[in-house]
Amino acid sequence: MTFQQQKYQVIKKATSYELANFILNYFLLKKDAVRYMYQNNIHAQSPILGTWTDQQIPNTYSCYGDFVMDTLLVKMLPVMKKHTGLDLCPTYSYARAYKKGDELRRHKDRPSCEISCTLNLGGDPWPIFIDGTGADNVIDEYKNIHKPNAPAGTKVLLEVGDMLVYSGCELEHWREPFDGNICGQVFLHYNHVNGPFADKNRFDGRPMDPNIPAQNIICIRKDNMVCIDKVGGTEIKSPTQKEISSLGKNGPCRFSLDIGLPMQGGGLIRCKIPIEAAGEDSFAFFLDPEYNRDYLVFKVRNWVGNQKVSGGSYPTIKKQSDRENYFI
């Protein structure tokens, strides 16, 4: 049966055995390297390196948004579109190296996981179960309590390179306690392009849309920024997301940036630069989890001035009066 008929489908050989095996070995090597760095205080714990503190399966190595897995997330998008018949946008990837005794409790996913897949990278076989009825049977996921008459679900056993595509927010899915030693799985999550969550959840709010050239992205720390209320002209220093969103919903949103511009021959000119965003879709929020800094991420329409800027580099100005030539 197709995805359209039952809201889940197994895709055989979605990727080659060789690629899946390569990614598994990469992930296991990363796990060992990260453990060594954490245990020897070589690097502070960071989401991009991975964690053993995932509440869903504690003490098991997991990683959100690994670069290799996110590359797979984008590369598998055409496959996901083809088999679901839906226009999708990527949200995030999540990989785990399961160990003996692990159990994935029965659950449904959050809104960033409208359409998901689990791709078997290799290791010992471990079936996943999926309840195609769409019923809500979970009473408490973390205590593994569900209704006594909950359906047993359909057992799906994937070979290396196979993936199960499913409606993660609609269908409960789970894995029973693992009897093997190691099993590598990566979850790839997507949203409907025209769905209610697409704009907010594209790449899970991270500034990494591959359709926007890198030179058209600028990240600005919010503590270096003042938001100007276009109605009353009031300046809001280090504005909250709620304050900025409320301004952006009604049209252009003005910002004043306190920055330093490099001068030819050395030195900086400190100045305030006004920026106007067209609306909510012109900027996004990004929280750097490692340093706990809040950024605004702007899509820059173009740089203006008497010389063209390319490759994402910023203009160097010769004298203070030149600064007005570079910004609109």
Image (cartoon, rainbow, N blue to C red):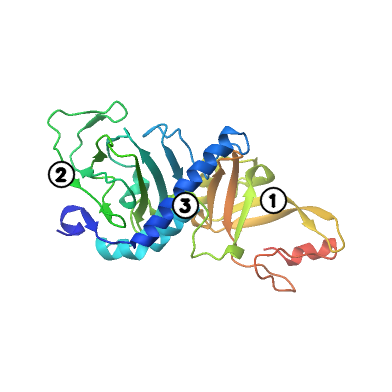
Q: Which mark is residue 26?
A: 3
Front residue (pair 191, 63): 63
Front residue (pair 149, 60): 60
For the residues marked 1 and 3, what is the alpha-carbon distance in whole angstroms? 42 Å
Front residue (pair 315, 214): 214
Quadrant (top left, top right, bottom left, bottom right) of the C terminus? bottom right
| Residue underneath mark 2 | 133
Disc 1 and disc 3 in contact, CB within 8 angstroms: no
Quadrant housing residue 109: top left
Residue at image point 69% right, 50% down: 257
Secondary structure beneath label 2: loop
Left or right: 227, with 194 as reference point: right
Give the amino acid at mark 1: Leu
For the residues marked 1 and 2, what is the alpha-carbon distance in whole angstroms? 52 Å
The location of residue 162, given as percent across then percent down, is 28, 56
Give the amino acid at mark 3: Tyr
Give the amino acid at mark 2: Thr
Residue at image point 30% right, 45% down: 124
| Residue underneath mark 1 | 257
Q: Earlier in the sequence, mark 3 or mark 2?
A: 3
Q: Earlier in the sequence, mark 1 or mark 3?
A: 3
For the residues marked 3 and 2, what is the alpha-carbon distance in whole angstroms? 37 Å
The answer to whether residue 134 is visible is yes
Q: Residues within 10 Å of mark 2 (few under 14, many from 20)?
A: few
Left or right: 52, with 197 as reference point: right
